[in-house]
Image (cartoon, rainbow, N blue to C red):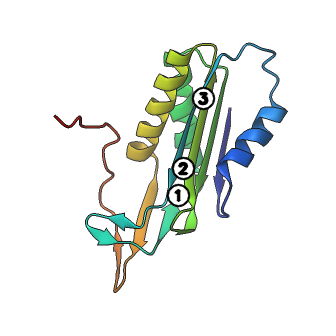
């Protein structure tokens, strides 16, 4: 399990490639579920020019560790990688990378989604968006569960 907060931009696919080279799962891994979240240029009906992502050092890493450990108790996982940006973030930058490896796709998919949803709703991060004329703190996270259109 690897959890890391970064103040500098990262390229998720390069991070995955490097992480995979350091792992030795010896053919046991049958599935990898990957989520990459990026900075959008809109939120709540307004154009967003950038964002500052604040966190509580020490507490944030501990909470992310607990979220990943909880997922490992629910599903049979081989490895978990969570990289998350903090500080100044530009539109289009990767904010979060979650990769879960397991022997079977169901465990990988379900754990990856659960980790991401828990992270969004319980990890101590605070977003301040820069708009055209002002700044604002984001008060709530959007739901990660899709609503099917009829």
Q: Where is residue 58 in the image (x, y as percent from the top left)?
A: 60, 51
Callout 1 environment at 10 Å: few (<14), some (14 to 19), or many (20+)? Answer: few
> Mark 3: which secondary structure?
strand
Q: Where is residue 77 in the image (x, y as percent from the top left)?
A: 61, 19
Q: Residue at x 61, y 35 (%)?
A: 99
Q: In which quarter of the image is the N terminus?
A: top right
Outermost residue toward the bottom? 133
**Nearer-the-camera pick, 125 or 106:** 106
The residue wearing badge 1 is 56
> Which comes before the other along the chain, label 3 or label 1?
1
Outermost residue toward the left? 150
Outermost residue toward the front? 150
> Mark 2: which secondary structure?
helix
- Residue 60 is marked as 2
Q: Which residue is drawn at 42% across and 38% down?
A: 118
Q: In which quarter of the image is the C terminus?
A: top left
* 37 sits to left or right of 31: left
As drawn, 4 above or below 75:
below
> Which comes before the other along the chain, label 2 or label 3?
2
Callout 3 environment at 10 Å: few (<14), some (14 to 19), or many (20+)? Answer: many
Tell me whether the residue at label 2 lies in contact with that at label 1, contact meaning CB atoms closer than 8 angstroms.
yes
* 17 sits to left or right of 39: right
**Nearer-the-camera pick, 13 or 3:** 13
* 99 sits to left or right of 55: right
- Residue 100 is marked as 3
């Amino acid at each position: 399990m690897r959890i890391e907060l970064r103040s500098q931009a990262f390229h998720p696919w390069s991070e995955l490639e490097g992480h995979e080279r350091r792992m030795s799962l010896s053919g046991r891994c049958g599935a990898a579920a990957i989520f990459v979240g990026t900075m959008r240029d809109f939120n709540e009906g307004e154009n967003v020019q950038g964002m500052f992502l604040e966190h509580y050092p020490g507490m944030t890493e501990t909470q992310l560790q607990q979220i990943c450990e909880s997922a490992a108790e629910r599903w049979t996982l081989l490895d978990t990688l969570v990289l998350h940006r903090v500080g100044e973030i530009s539109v289009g930058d990767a904010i979060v990378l979650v990769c879960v490896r397991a022997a079977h796709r169901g465990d990988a998919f379900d754990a990856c989604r659960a980790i991401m949803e828990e992270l969004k709703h319980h990890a101590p991060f605070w977003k301040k968006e820069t708009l055209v004329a002002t700044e604002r703190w984001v008060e709530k996270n959007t739901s990660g569960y899709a609503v099917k259109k009829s």
